Amino acid sequence: MELPVLYAMRSSLYSAKARSYLIKQRIDYLERPPGDPRFPGDVVPAIGRWIIPVLQTADGQIIQDTCDIIDYFDATMPPERSAKPPAGVQNIVTRVLEMFGSEGLMRPALHYRWNFDGLNMPFVGEDFGRGLMLTDGSSTFDFGPEIDPSDGAAARAEVSKFAADRMRALTLDFGVNPETIPEVERSYLEFLELLSAHLETAPHLLGGRPTLGDFGFIAPLYAHLSRDPEPSLIMKRDAWPVWRWVERMNSPIADCGEYGETSADLFANDEIPPTLIALLAYIGREFAAEVEAHVGFIDNWLAENEEVVEGDVVGGRPYRRSLGLVTWDWRGHEITTNAIPYRLLHLQRIQEAFEAADAGAQQAAAELLGQAGLGGLLELKARRRVVRSDNRELWGAEQQPVVLA
Ligand SMILES: N[C@@H](CCC(=O)N[C@@H](CS)C(=O)NCC(=O)O)C(=O)O
C-alpha cells in the first residue's frame, strides 16, 4: 500500500506540528523535502503556492495546512487516542493553546533564529540548503544562472541565503526590532519557566497524551527554539522539562518514563490544573491584545473593502497572507505587525468548541479564560468568516462583528 507523504523541512516551524502528530499517532508515512522534484512537479501546481507542510494522502489527496492535516487523521482516531478531548473545558482550552503555539510565539522563534548568525547560520544554512536542494544536486527551482547545484556546499549556501533573506525580513514584520528585543527575550524566558513548571507535573499540556495544544506548541518549540544552536542552549540550560517534552513529541512511544507509571488519560474531570492556569494567564498578557488588534484591523479592512464577496481568496492571491500592518501595545511597547486573517480560523475553532460544550462547561471555560484575560477569544469576530477550500483561505459568510472599540 502507498504511504502518505509529508513534504516538510526540518528547519520549518509548521512542518514540526504535522510531523509530530504523525509520529505520536504512529501513522506510517514518508517524509520528503520540498527539494524533491515531486514537490514543484505535482504539489505546488495543485495548491497554487509554495508552502510547507503539505500532506499527500495514500489515495493521492493533497492537503496543506497543519490544522487540516491533523483533522484529516484525527477524524478516524478512537476517542482515547484523539488529539481532541471530548466536548468541554479541555476541548476549548486545547484550541486556545493550539492557537497560541501556532501563532503567538513567532517573536522568540524568529529572533532566536535570525539574530544569532555566528552560532546559528552554519547549521541553519545547511538545513535550508539540503531541504531545498537534494544532496545529489538535483534542484527543484530555477535558482538562476548564478547557482549551479553541482557546486555542493557552495550552492547550498547560496540557496539558503536566498531563502533566509526572505525569512529574515519576517522578524521585523512580526515586531522584533532593537527596541523590543530585550522584552522578546524576557518574555520567552518567562514562558519557558511557566511551561517547565507545568511539565514538572505531567508529560503533556492536558495530562497523559498530546492534544491539539501540544501540536501547536511544538511548531515554534521544535525547529527554531529547540533545534537551532543558540536557543537550544537556552532551552537545555533553563528548561529541561521543555527540552524533554520536545523529544517526547518526536518519539513514537509515550517516552515519559521519568513520570513513573502514567496512563494516556487526560486530567480527570475535565480539570485544568493551576500550573496550566498560570500559563493561560501568561498567554493572556502576551497575546490577547494582539488578537484583539488583528480582529479589529481585519473587520475594518472588510468594512472598507465592500466589494469583497463570499468565496473571494483572502488577500487576493493565495500567497498573500497579510492584509496590512496593524499597531498595538505589547508589554508596554507600541509594535506594528502583519494582520493575518488566517488567525480567524483559529478563533473559529475555539468558538466552535465553545458552542459544542454544555452550559456548565461553557460557564467554567468563560470564567477560566476571562480570568486569564482571554475572554475575547470566545467572542471576537470580524464581519466575515474565513473558510478553507481547495487549500486556500477564502472569505466566508457575513456575520455580526464583535470587536473591541
Ligand atoms: N497555516 C499554515 C502555515 C504554513 C507556513 O507558513 N509554512 C511556512 C514554513 S514553516 C512556509 O511554507 N513559508 C513559505 C513562504 O511563506 O513562502 C499551516 O499551518 O500549515
Image (spheres, rainbow, N blue to C red):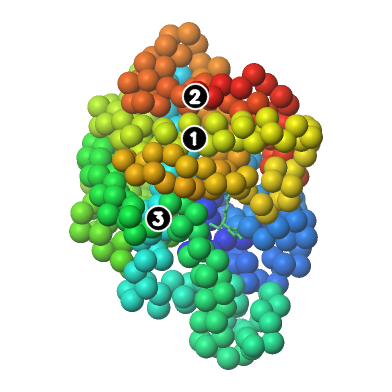
From the viewer's perspective, is residue 402 above or below residue 152?
A: above
Query: Which residue: 58% across, 91% down?
Result: 151
Q: In this view, does 301 lie above or below 186?
A: above
Compute the Cα span from label 1 to label 3: 17 Å
Picture coordinates of residue 84, whole percent (x, y): 50, 31
Ligand 1 sits in which quadrant? bottom right
Please give the name of the residue rendered at 77% of the width and 39% of the height, measured from the top-left corner: 312
Secondary structure under tag 3 reads: loop
The numbered mark, 1 or 3, whose residue comes first in the sequence reads 3
Q: Which of the two discs, 1 and 2, labels the residue nearer the N terminus?
A: 1
Residue 43: x and y in percent read: 73, 60
Label 2 sits on a secondary structure element that is: loop
Q: What crowding class fits label 1: few (fewer than 14 Cα within 10 Å), some (14-19), or many (20 or more)?
A: some
Q: Which residue type carries mark 2? A: Leu
Where does label 1 land, which residue? Answer: 293
Q: Could you classify mark 2 by the number of other residues whose Cα lies within 10 Å: few (under 14), some (14-19), or many (20 or more)?
A: few
The CA distance from mark 3 to mark 2 is 25 Å
Going by the picture, which residue comes out furthest to the top? 359
Looking at the rendered structure, the kind of residue marked 1 is Ala
Task: Kindly identify the amino acid type of the residue bearing the numbered disc 3.
Answer: Val
SS at mark 1 in the image:
helix
- Label number found at residue 404: 2
Q: Which mark is residue 176?
A: 3
Residue sitting at x 53%, y 75%: 160
Residue at disc 1, CB closer than 8 Å to ligand 1 = no
Is 60 above or below relative to 403? below
